[in-house]
Image (spheres, helix red, strand yellow):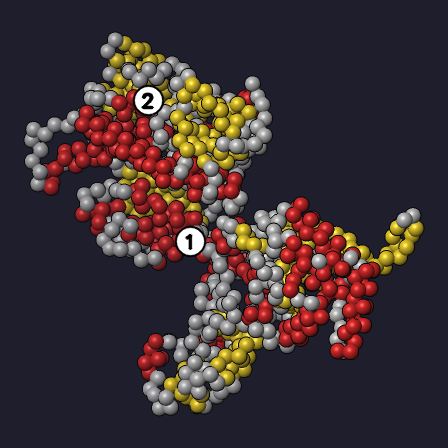
Amino acid sequence: MSYKSNNGNDFDVLIIGSGPGGYVAAIRAAQLGLRAACVEADKLGGVCLNVGCIPTKALLSSAFVVNEMKEGERHGIRTEGVTFQLRPAQERSRKVAEQMNRGIESLFRKNRVTHVQGFACLAGEGIVRVNSRGKESTFDAKHVVLATGSRPKDLPFLKIDEDRVISSTGALMLENAPASLVVVGAGAVGIEFADVFNAYGTQVTIIEALDRILPLEDADCSAVVERSFRKRGVNVFTGARLEKAELREEGVKLTFEDRTGDTHELDVERVLSAVGRIPNTEDIGLENVGVKTENGFVVVDERLRTNVEGIYAIGDCAGRQLLAHKASHEGVLCIEHIAGNARGGLDYENVPSCTYCHPEVASVGLTEAQAKERGLDVQIGKFPWSGIGRAVAGGHAEGLIKVVRDKKYSEILGAHIVGPHATELIAEFVLGRHLEATMEELEKAMHPHPTLSEGVAEGALAALGRPIHI
Amino acid sequence: MEALSPTMEEGQVVKWHKAEGDTVAEGELLAEVETDKATMELVSRATGTLRRIIIGEGATAPVGAIIAVIGTADEDLGDVVDVVPDVDGREAKEEAESRKEPETEDKRGIGEGPTETYKKKSDKEIEATIPTGYGSRVKASPLARRLAAAVGVDLFQVRGSGPGGRIVKRDVMEAAEQVRARLPSGTMAAADGGEPASPDYDDIQLSQMRKTIAHRLAESLGPVPHFFLTIQVDMDRAGQARERINALLEKRDERVSLNDLLIRAVAGALRQHPAVNASWQGDYVRRYRRVHVGVAVAVDDGLITPVIRDADRKGVAEIAREVRMLAARARAKKLAPEEYTGATFSISNLGMFGIHQFTAVINPPEAAILAVGHVEEVPVVMGGQVVVRRRMRATMSCDHRVVDGAVGARFLQTLKAMLEDPAAVLL
């Protein structure tokens, strides 16, 4: 049934989904004096907060401590008889997620955002029907923002059952570290879980179809992580083709071809499928109002408007980078456009990406290869962390900082960091790019000594051909 | 340099009334300074001896810069020299010199006409021309500055699309693209090949006012979404009313113009339509309780908009007196800041130039401006007869964030009714 709303009585803005896109949009709407509601079918905070970014970071922090303990002797810690158990780390991870979840509840209360529990479905333009445990209610809203997110993708011959074949969600629920695990897909998700399970004693094997792990990052960063993983006993097969997966009583038997064409068979306790995500755009009534999609993603313009007036889409369900911070920024921009005080769109070339494995990887802008593909005249600066006192003192000096500079106007085209706290350090490049600083400004701004941030300045200097400490 | 007007960012010393060594008293006239609006008097804030003049006549300094040093007659200025590295004035004076006679290099700019040249500069030249902050009043990203210097785009001519009108890379690229598009096809090759044969253009130095106009109007057309409403008004009865008023004023040797009548009618209409007497404030709309009408006055180097305060409470004769007095002061560049700020609505009348109809650019934060054409005799069909009537076209530019089409249209209806039946003004 489809009918047209004539009022928008209940809310100015109704947001479907409370992930980092949806809840941020709801708060921003309330700040701007709009009557805002946020409908959530599951827990506030969406995947990111409950079964994504946040709990994973808790586990990775635990894994980091575990790895430090393994090398504790260099700090004077005797590690005989020490055991590492995943269960308490998982429990801590759940607690962290719950704490953050409650935080959103209180943010909603503080900002007077109406939280509607239930599964929302577009019933007409400006009309949203919410099913809450069989009970249906209908809301009128002037503007409806779709922020329904995404979920792990299945491979046709490797269906996720969250038992033997798990997704990231299942991985966060495992009580004990499996004896062996194959990670299919070496993007950020696969690499992070490989890091965690390796720390807790699992024999981890990574299988990636493309020619390197973290294929979206600069090749130099991929190489550093791969080297580090191999050193810790992780098996890495890149350029490999997974051919068969047979579910067995006690695990999975995988058949795959490596890059040289040799076939391998592998019996493992569990398989983690991390081959990408698909948008949650079915069952939300898009067809009732005629919202256009492409490969499942809602089609939006630079102001996040769909083809139907009054309906918007942000975050994963609207495509482009499937990243929480991109979703939040789209949420804010979308609402500000609705309120009439925004201009233009987001700069999708300045979206940082982060992988929290050890060593961490973070980047923004163009890779060396992308810059060259665009025919830009670039100068590449590479600076190893071994040249930074603070990194060496901290005991983590593997990796490098790589900066791509446009020779003509000294624009910061891209930055790629692999090493300690890379995910924090990248923010300076994001800010620099946002403000259109040139490489000289980055270098001339004084960085405190001794800190890892000196690496940023040295990276900039390297891209100008005059690093000091190398 | 004191801020002599609320919008002043830099000032040009026109004349020093004291010489080095003269004694000055607090409150005594020290110098005349041309600001973005007018030439203002700068009075001394201290009593003592004028020891050093740092900013010479003709030189410009940003607000807050030290332009002179007043001390006791025999005070050692050594300490001051330490604090102000350019206290001897050499740098500032040199800067002033070089501004008077810019190198040929700098004359190859953009923004004048189809015959400009366009030359790529070497990296060294680029380095030399990158504005370094001091004295450069353009808000632009470092990358935009470098790009502009490299491709020869004058940042003063560029409209910034970043936050607060900040010029970013995209803006400079677009500006450069426009220059390229305007160049005749042969020019570029010639310019790249060497020196241009002879300069067939004149570069006019920007006055403070010209800078402000460019700056403000660009600021306006950028973030202010304009739309335009045009209405035709029958001015016969307004003309008759004016004659009657003038007959009454004859003894006092005063006259009113149709424009004065128009100001009064606009003020009356604004009183009835407070939604138009408003301004956009970023996150709210401000409606003014008082009606202050700005009247654009052409002066030698541009225009300025003196304000008739509370125009809705004044008689036409009083308005006429004020307009004449303010216009004269504007032309003499003697307007005080309070005389040209605070308008809630503006009128620009080009009728005296025979302009039939035009659109004016809104002066932010005002929400609208009325562009008035000349009153002309036109044949009109009235009651089946062709008669000659005096008609005038007025076009209102509206800031759509504040004034919607219907709101503006209703305001214009009221204005039209008042002018077509001037008795309505008395209501």
Q: Which image quarter holds the N terminus of chain A? A: top right
Q: Earlier in the sequence, mark 2 or mark 1?
A: 2
- Which secondary structure lies at badge 2? loop
Q: What percent of the width, then of the height, locates residue B343?
A: 59, 62
The chain under label 2 reads A
Q: Amino acid at mark 2?
A: Ser
Work out whether A50 lies above or below A461: above
- Badge 2 is on which residue? A167
- Which secondary structure lies at badge 1? loop
Neighbour tally class for label 1: few under 14, some 14-19, many 20 plus, Cα within 10 Å = some
Q: Amino acid at mark 1?
A: Ala
- Residue B375's quadrant in the figure? bottom right
- Badge 1 is on which residue? A437
Using the numbered discs, state the Cα–Cα distance from disc 2 to disc 1 in whole angstroms.
41 Å
Residue drawn at (14%, 33%), measured in percent from left and top? A70
In front here: B350 or B152?
A: B350
Dot in front, 2 or 1: 2
Viewer can see residue B115: no
- Residue B235's quadrant in the figure? bottom right
Residue drawn at (48%, 52%), measured in percent from left and top? B163
With A249 as the anchor, is B422 left or right in this view?
right
Number of numbered discs on residues:
2
Q: What percent of the width, then of the height, locates residue B124?
A: 47, 63
Q: What percent of the width, then of the height, locates residue B164?
A: 49, 55
In front here: A427 or B210?
A: B210
With A102 as the anchor, is A116 left or right in this view?
right
